[in-house]
Amino acid sequence: MIAQNRSRNVPHWFDMASLDGKVVLITGASGGLGAAVTQAFLAAGGSVVVVASKWPNPPEGTTALGADLSSEAGCTGVVSSTLDRFGRVDALMHLVGGFAGGSSIEATPLDEFDRMMTINFRTALNMLRAVLPPMKERESGTIAMIGSKAAVDMPDGLAAYNASKAAMVALVRTAAAECKKSGVTVNAVLPSTIATPAMRADATQAEAAKWVTPESIAELLIWLCGPAGRDVTGALLPMYGRL
Ligand SMILES: NC(=O)c1ccc[n+]([C@@H]2O[C@H](COP(=O)([O-])OP(=O)(O)OC[C@H]3O[C@@H](n4cnc5c(N)ncnc54)[C@H](OP(=O)(O)O)[C@@H]3O)[C@@H](O)[C@H]2O)c1
């Protein structure tokens, strides 16, 4: 079956509708990575619920929800709206995240630590707390969260970002341990720089060629949602491109 929303960048095997109507919640869907992941999941046959703070132009073919995921109520609202509409959540692709850095630990304002912990850790924590109970009850679910290579490499000058992504990764591994008997898988993808339109805008072609593409991340996420991903949990999946 050829999906209606096929984009030029989506590989042909997505046309096989491999997701077969699975209900997939994609947070951060309006971002550079999120736009590509949304198109790939649509093309793979998912019933896609996209979440961002606001939606001036929601993607065609999706159910678009606006919510602040740094609040617990925002996350429980998104999950209950999805359950009301579709009756289940088969997969959560948590793409929300933000970046800041450039100073040593002592020169970084404390509020930068708070902002990074909120966007990179708190949103992930809130979404897990909202989506795990219905997934555990059904004994089925796929969760993937986007971390960063920085979560394990810890480059200098990025303490707030590094710590917040490392905290998110610790949460993912703990969730996987807690879900072992439930049939729910929980993994983190760790990209280096992603070749999103925003990142490409300031880069040379040679620089961008070393980065990981949004489309290849989307392929991995779809694979995790399929039968082959069933036994993969607690993994930190490096997607470093050529960096
Ligand atoms: N770009 C890179 O090179 C790179 C490298 C490594 C890892 N990553 C990670 O990859 C993921 C995607 O990156 P990206 O470049 O696509 O980011 P992006 O373009 O900045 O998009 C961020 C997304 O998160 C949403 N968001 C932010 N705060 C939110 C909140 N409080 N509540 C609800 N939604 C919120 C944004 O929606 P609104 O605008 O409506 O708030 C937007 O959809 C992030 O986790 C990022 O840390 C990116």
Image (cartoon, rainbow, N blue to C red):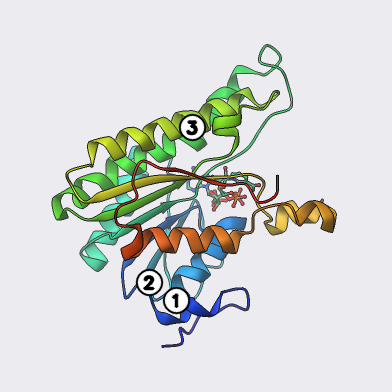
Res. 10 image quadrant: bottom right
Q: Which residue is mark 2?
A: 46
Q: Which residue is mark 1?
A: 61
Residue at x 35%, y 58% (from the top left corner): 229
Badge 2 crowding class, 10 Å Cα cut-off, few under 14, some 14 to 19, many 20 or more, is: many
Q: Indicate the secondary structure of the residue bearing disc 3.
A: helix
Badge 3 crowding class, 10 Å Cα cut-off, few under 14, some 14 to 19, many 20 or more, is: some
* Gap in angstroms between the C-alphas marked 1 and 2: 10 Å
**Mark 3 lies within 8 Å of ligand 1 (Cβ measured):** yes
Residue 135 is tagged as none
Res. 105 image quadrant: top right
* Gap in angstroms between the C-alphas marked 3 and 1: 30 Å
The x and y percentages for residue 3 are 45, 83
Mark 1: amino acid: Gly
Farthest residue to the left: give it: 137
Mark 3: amino acid: Thr
Q: Which residue is mark 3?
A: 118
* Gap in angstroms between the C-alphas marked 2 and 3: 29 Å
